[in-house]
Image (cartoon, grey):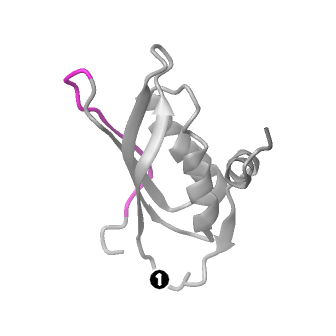
Amino acid sequence: MEEKYGTRMIRENKLERLENQNRKRDYTIQFTCPELTCLCPLSGFPDFATVYIEYQPDKYCVELKSLKLYFNGFRDKNIFHEELANKILDDLVELLQPKYMQVLADFNQRGNIHTKVIARHGKKNENA
């Protein structure tokens, strides 16, 4: 069976960055991904999460289409909740080298437990 173009785009995706066009001031960028899915490494059952990203850029900003495809790449990955939030943070910090970044992975309740994982990098400028 021929691979669908969306599946290929997700498989071949690489996070990309753009030059920050507004370096004269600090400011905050926020993203919400309400449909991230991944697989539990122990059971193989799907996990569903809303991922919130907040960051204060320095030289670079993330290119949004590459971020969308990056998120979609988790759909078939076996990954624990804690690992997911920290991997997203590590990958984006490596790419962007932001002044500050926070990743909040808010997982849907499963087994009567609601999990939120917050991972941070740097110090937030509260005036931005």
Query: Is residue 121 magenta-colored?
Result: yes
Q: Residue at x 56, y 57 (%)?
A: 68
Furthest toward the left, the residue is: 112
**Stretch of the chain drawn in magenta:** 111-124
- Residue 118's x, y, as percent? 35, 42
Q: Is residue 70 left or right of residue 127?
A: right
Q: Is residue 50 left or right of residue 99?
A: left
Q: In this rendering, does residue 124 appear at all?
A: yes
Furthest toward the front, the residue is: 1
The residue lying toward the viewer, choosing from 116 and 2, is 2
Q: Is residue 122 left or right of residue 1?
A: left
- Residue 6's x, y, as percent? 67, 53
The residue lying toward the viewer, choosing from 123 and 29, is 29
Q: Residue at x 75, y 49 (%)?
A: 8
Give the residue type at disc 1. Answer: Arg
From the viewer's perspective, is residue 91 above or below residue 124? above
From the viewer's perspective, is residue 62 above or below residue 44? below
The residue lying toward the viewer, choosing from 122 and 55, is 55
Q: Residue at x 41, y 71 (%)?
A: 28
- Residue 100's x, y, as percent? 46, 59
- Residue 53's x, y, as percent? 42, 56
Number of callouts: 1
Q: Residue at x 49, y 34 (%)?
A: 38
From the viewer's perspective, is residue 118 above or below residue 93? above
Disc 1 is placed on an element classified as loop
Residue pointed to by mark 1: 25
Q: In this rendering, does residue 97 appear at all?
A: no
Q: Is residue 13 left or right of residue 77?
A: right
